[in-house]
Image: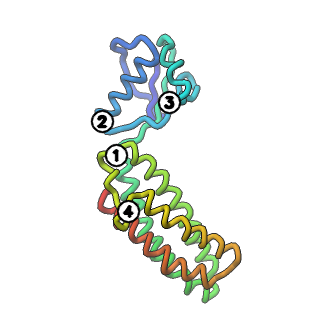
Amino acid sequence: MDLFVNGSKIDASLEDEKTIGDVLRSFELNCEETDAAVIGIKVNGENISADSFDSYAEKALESNTVFEFDVVTRQAVGESFKKLSSLFNTLAERMEKIPVELQNGKGRDACASITQLADDIDLFCHTAALSSLFPETYKSIRIDEKPFAAFFADFTPVLSQFEEALQSNDTVLVGDLSEYEICPRLKAVSKALEAFS
């Protein structure tokens, strides 16, 4: 049996495991004990989904069975939040400058900030989804006194309006939304994440 975690081979020895399910359950327990969570499983190169888990679990364990686990740790989520806190703080400063950049013909700089906004929000949503695997630590995060979902439910219409303003080349609205709507929200996210990193 070969066991890989996040692409690296690890030494593992069998105890009483007889089926693939025994190994999967044993690994899951080990993860729980070490503040980690499994986010992906492959057995012999095939992805194991929730739908196929039971049928794979019943299969006999063979000496050449290869397990690949994608794992995230509570610590890694905290480190990602720390990085995002810094990114959002820097990005808030950049978004605040967009109105001036647009007025002074620095559209390229403004576009770079807008691209960074999209990338950072995507990274944040991914990390927030992973944080839900550790609810005892992260479920209490509040952004402007709101849970993640409520905060982003309020933020999404602003981002949609921002996208429409970009498409219609309404530089005045792009500038106003950047400075007065997006920037304060980014600062709020940064502050909330800083407390949990």
Q: Residues within 10 Å of mark 4 (few under 14, many from 20)?
A: few
Please tell me how many numbered marks the rendered image carries.
Answer: 4
In the displayed structure, does residue 183 sit left or right of residue 98? left
Relative image position of residue 107 (x, y in whole percent): 64, 80
Residue under numbered circle 1: 135
> Between marks 1 and 2, how big is the CA–CA gap?
15 Å
Relative image position of residue 58 (x, y in whole percent): 49, 14
Question: Considering only order in the chain, which callout, 4 or 2, is on the residue closer to the N terminus?
Answer: 2
Circle number at residue 41: 3
Question: Disc 1 or disc 2, which is closer to the eye?
Answer: 1
| Residue at image coords 56%, 84% | 99
Residue under numbered circle 2: 34
Residue under numbered circle 4: 146
> Between marks 3 and 4, how big is the CA–CA gap?
34 Å
Question: Disc 3 or disc 4, which is closer to the eye?
Answer: 4
- Is mark 1 in CB contact (under 8 Å) with mark 2? no
Q: Quadrant of residue 162?
A: bottom right
Relative image position of residue 127 (x, y in whole percent): 44, 51
Residue closest to the eye, 62 or 134: 134
Q: Residues within 10 Å of mark 2 (few under 14, many from 20)?
A: few
